[in-house]
Image (spheres, grey):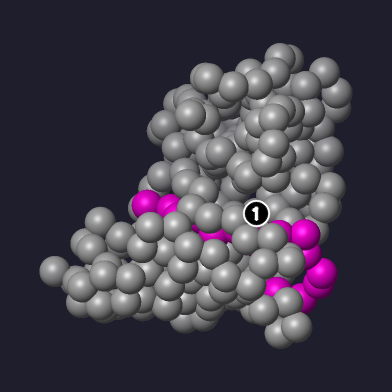
Amino acid sequence: GAVVSQHPSWVICKSGTSVKIECRSLDFQATTMFWYRQFPKQSLMLMATSNEGSKATYEQGVEKDKFLINHASLTLSTLTVTSAHPEDSSFYICSATKVDRPKNIQYFGAGTRLSVL
Amino acid sequence: SQQGEEDPQALSIQEGENATMNCSYKTSINNLQWYRQNSGRGLVHLILIRSNEREKHSGRLRVTLDTSKKSSSLLITASRAADTASYFCATDEGAQKLVFGQGTRLTINP
């Protein structure tokens, strides 16, 4: 199998606070992890690509100081939304690819719904 | 950037009928994948078709790929209520990233 666990599944926070979302590959080593944002009834928007031990690569228009990504091991990546504001409210989803082939199939977490008050 | 355009955006059919959804893309691809997303959940990989393949089957799923028209279709046969979900195509352009289409929201009515 290829199970990706994402935690928390739902978080409510006050404006100005920071929120950390964890993404773990439970039964495989992940070469790369991806962080997406999804608005209601819309597609996934890639925010950044994360490789273990190196800095994340952010997509154009995504503020790296706002969305901090840490990929400390082959099984864990975290996304921290710093100084969250209501406009950051969204559904955040992580995914991972496996070390062994096929490399470009992504295995997704269940997502985190962030509500900023 | 979103490359894939999916058609239709929403589809509602009766249980037992076949469901067909289409995806078009703009650039050359290495492969094309289809994913399914249940409401409020993550995506699940369904099937991958390589650029040198024209058709692929997996259970009740049938995927076609026409690289000359830059399009793909996903057919779900004998639909079930549990097939209700959003379906996304995703293209692999290299550099590990996938570009997802806008998705088709499929509703199967009992």
- Callout 1: chain: A
User: Outermost residue toward the top?
Assistant: A73
Q: Residue furthest bottom?
A: B69
Q: How many marks?
A: 1
Residue A81 appears in view: yes
Q: Position of residue B65 (x, y in %)?
A: 63, 73
| Residue at image location 37% in from the left, 69% down from the top | B76
Spot occupied by residue B102 in the image (x, y as percentages of width and height): 57, 68
Q: Residue at x 44, y 57 (%)?
A: B58
**Which residue is rendered at x = 78% and y = 22% of the image?**
A52
Who is closer to the viewer here, B62 or A34? B62
Element under disc 1 = strand
Front-most of A54 and A116?
A54
Q: Is residue B30 magenta?
A: yes
Quadrant hosting residue B84: bottom left
To which residue does mark 1 refer? A45
Callout 1: 10 Å neighbours few (<14), some, many (20+)? some
A43 to the left or right of B24: left
Q: Is residue A61 above or below residue B64?
A: above
> Where in the figure is residue A28, as x and y percent of width and height?
59, 22
Q: Which residues are the magenta region?
A: B25-38
